[in-house]
Amino acid sequence: MTELTDHERATLKRAAFGVVYLVSNADPGFLAMLRESVAASGAFTGARGLARDVLTSGSLPRFPRRDPGRVEAEVLPALTESLAILRAKAPDEVDNYRDAVLSAAQRAAEAAHGVRPSEAAVLAKVRAALA
């Protein structure tokens, strides 16, 4: 398996979990956030290869609770950086990572009351960052 530095692993993980955070914050409410987190975790555990290893090991990243705008400003560029890391070090893993992140975002958005317009807007930004 390809070796990534601790910083690279943290970037991939923070970006992926940040996407789930952004989707969850687009539809606030404790129960909705809980359902969305559980749904997204299923996508991460169902990932393959390096993506699964990175997304299911180690501690979870923390995000500021009261500033989703700051999180978005960090997460979307981190998604693009994550793809660049994988293209350089493990090009055969790019699709696995992209699929895991998109699946987690979609599952989170659908988990509580279907996909709301605010969640669809986040999904569109995530897709653009992963394009």
Image (cartoon, rainbow, N blue to C red):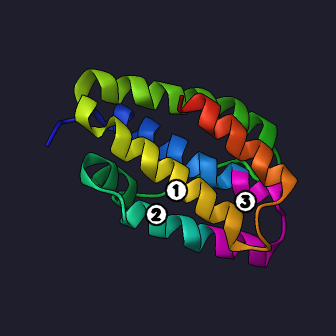
- Of label 3 and label 1, which has the lower sequence position? 3
Q: Three-letter amino acid code at disc 1?
A: Ser
Query: How far apart are the two marked residues, 2 and 3, measured between alpha carbons?
Result: 15 Å
Q: Is residue 74 left or right of residue 122?
A: left
Residue at the image position 62 percent from the left and 57 percent from the top: 106
Residue corresponding to mark 2? 43
Q: Amino acid at mark 2?
A: Ala
Magenta residues span 23-36
Q: Is residue 50 visible?
A: yes
Q: Tell me the SS state at disc 2.
A: helix
Give the labeled residue for mark 3.
24
CA distance separating discs 3 and 1: 14 Å
User: Does the magenta stretch mainly form a helix, a strand or a loop?
Assistant: helix
Closest to the observer: 40 or 62? 40
Viewed as shown, does residue 36 lie left or right of 121? left
Magenta span includes 25: yes
The correct choice, above or below, for 31 with respect to 1 in the image is below
Residues at discs 1 and 2 in contact (Cβ within 8 Å): yes
Q: Is residue 44 above or below residue 99?
A: below
Pick whichever of labels 1 and 2 is earlier in the sequence. 2
Helix, strand or loop under label 1: helix
Residue 59 in the image: state x and y as whole percent: 43, 58
Tell me, yes or no, whether the two marked residues, 2 and 3, touch with CB atoms within 8 Å: no
**Residue 115 counted in the magenta span:** no
Tell me the number on the disc at residue 103: 1
Q: Amino acid at mark 3?
A: Ser
Depicted 125 relative to depicted 18: above or below: above
Q: Determine the residue positioned at 53% across, 41% down.
A: 15
Hey, which quadrant is residue 113 in on the image?
Answer: bottom right
